[in-house]
Amino acid sequence: MDKITYTIQLKGGKEYTLEVDLDRSNHIELSNSETHAFWTKLDYNQCANCPLQATKRKYCPVALDIEEIAGKFKDVISIERADVWVRTKDRSFFKNCDVQEALKSLFGLIMASGSCPVLSRLKPLACFHLPFATIEETIQHLVGIYLIKQHLIYREGETAPDWDLKGVEELYQQLETVNIHLMNRLRDASNKDANLNALYLFVTLTTLIATDIHEMIGEINPILRKFL
């Protein structure tokens, strides 16, 4: 199993180490017998497009995954500076940044690698996680992985490949709904704004992609044309 570790050292000296297991498929089943914060219950601000049933699942899988982090940073201001180290199996990354930027990167990894039926469709991105990715890097990463999948579908003759990225547009429209409901949950889990602003940055990126991914691809077209 691959694990990615985030170490966030705040300017005041507090340090938090958070390990993300990319293969935690049984997480929600194991946690149903435990006690968690009220805002993690599935029927609390449940996403409008959530296919899970509160009669069968007690807790929201995403809320469970971010519960520990939300607790650690509930009293932290979003613009507080932090030194952040990210360690993967093959390499390490470092950046001095606002706490909200660090948490945005961490939230993105956690949400994509968990058990949420909607967000888990992004798991390939989690497997090739790039911390602190810019919007251009995110687009290149997302579209590149998606088109590789379409190429494999084409080679294997399963169904007609989606070269026009309709699947990406549909997925990110679904993600908009999920992210807005998650923000509603985090409002009740936070005293300061670090958690909320981190997720807000993630929501903003999702909205941009959902609105017009083709326009965003067009913005990196000069780079692609130059080297390919």
Image (cartoon, helix red, strand yellow):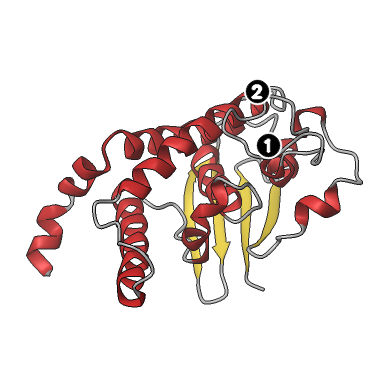
Q: Mark 2 and mark 1 in contact (Cβ < 8 Å)?
A: no
SS state under label 2: helix
Q: Is residue 198 left or right of residue 138?
A: right
- Name the residue nearer the viewer: 27 or 98: 27
Residue pointed to by mark 1: 73
Q: Is residue 185 left or right of residue 137?
A: right
Count of numbered marks: 2
> Residue 40, how many percent across, how many down?
76, 34
Q: Is residue 188 left or right of residue 104?
A: right
Measured in 3D between alpha carbons, the distance from the residue under mark 1 to the one under mark 2, in whole angstroms, is 12 Å
Callout 2 amino acid: Arg
Vertical order, 150 against 53 (above or below): below
- Please identify the quadrant where the N terminus is shown: bottom right
Tell me the crowding category of disc 1: few under 14, some 14 to 19, or many 20 or more residues within 10 angstroms, Cα based. many
- Please identify the quadrant where the C terminus is shown: bottom left
Q: Earlier in the sequence, mark 1 or mark 2?
A: 1
Residue pointed to by mark 2: 187
> Residue 158, how many percent across, how many down?
38, 69
Res. 131 in view: yes
Callout 1 amino acid: Phe
> Residue 123, how many percent across, how many down?
53, 58
